[in-house]
Image (tube, grey):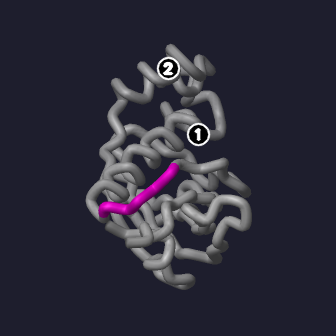
């Protein structure tokens, strides 16, 4: 199990692979972000996107699925997150793209009021199959401290 004490500032990692499908882009948009350029090839062709593109919020969801799979694989004692900072959608995400994640731990801090946990900040870069960054943000993670035995 990876605990707060095991997280090192400056640690970099790369993980995930998420294939973006047209069906998923449209289904997400129909339910949560029904803007024409997320729903229709014809409407999207008339915009700066040039073709159907995924909602930025959908991109966040795809990234979250990769993050959770990575946390499970690395058995981190994660306790959720109070949020993210500096979320930026840099480039459109299109059906057919394959996304992956790169992270770097920026800082960590033990909780003053809750000794059983700490927090850490990580710069997240999401890249497509051409290694072009499509999204960045700084995540704030909460993680359990090593249990006292």
Q: Which residue is mark 2?
A: 40
Which residue corresponds to the image point at 59% horizontal and 22% vertical from the top-left?
A: 33
Seen in the picture, residue 62 relative to 14 is either above or below; the reply is above
Can you see residue 85? Answer: yes
Which residue corresponds to the image point at 41% horizontal and 53% vertical from the top-left?
A: 67
Q: Residue furthest left?
A: 73
The quarter of the displayed image where residue 56 is located: top right
Of the two numbered discs 2 and 1 in the rendering, the one whose residue sits closer to the viewer: 1
Q: Give the x, y percent position of residue 28.
A: 47, 23
Real-space Cα distance between discs 2 and 1?
A: 16 Å
Seen in the picture, residue 39 relative to 76 is either above or below; the reply is above
Which residue corresponds to the image point at 48% horizontal and 39% vertical from the top-left?
A: 61
Q: Quadrant of the N terminus?
A: bottom left
Q: Give the x, y percent position of residue 22.
A: 36, 29
Q: Give the x, y percent position of residue 36.
A: 60, 19
Q: Which residue is mark 1?
A: 56
Q: Does residue 22 show up magenta in the picture?
A: no
Q: Main secondary structure of the magenta part?
A: loop
Magenta stretch in the rendered image: 75-79
Q: Does residue 76 show up magenta in the picture?
A: yes
Can you see residue 36? Answer: no
The quarter of the displayed image where residue 120 is located: bottom right
Tell whether 78 sits left or right of 50: left
Q: Quadrant of the C terminus?
A: bottom left
Report crowding for label 2: few under 14, some 14 to 19, many 20 or more residues within 10 A (C-alpha). Answer: some
Which residue corresponds to the image point at 66% horizontal and 52% vertical from the top-left?
A: 84
Element under disc 2: loop
């Amino acid at each position: 199990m990876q605990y707060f004490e095991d997280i090192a500032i400056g640690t970099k990692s790369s993980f995930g692979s998420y294939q973006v499908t047209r069906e998923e882009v449209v289904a997400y948009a129909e339910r949560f972000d029904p803007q024409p350029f997320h729903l229709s090839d014809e409407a999207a062709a008339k915009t700066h996107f040039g073709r159907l593109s995924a909602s930025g919020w959908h991109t966040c969801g795809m990234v979250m699925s990769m993050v959770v799979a990575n946390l499970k694989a690395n058995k981190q004692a994660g306790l959720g997150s109070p949020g993210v900072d500096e979320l930026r959608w840099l480039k459109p995400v299109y059906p057919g793209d394959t996304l992956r994640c790169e992270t770097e731990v920026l800082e960590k801090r033990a909780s003053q009021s809750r000794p059983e946990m700490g927090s850490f900040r990580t710069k997240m870069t999401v890249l497509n199959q051409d290694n072009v960054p499509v999204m960045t943000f700084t995540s704030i993670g909460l993680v359990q401290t090593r249990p006292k035995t």
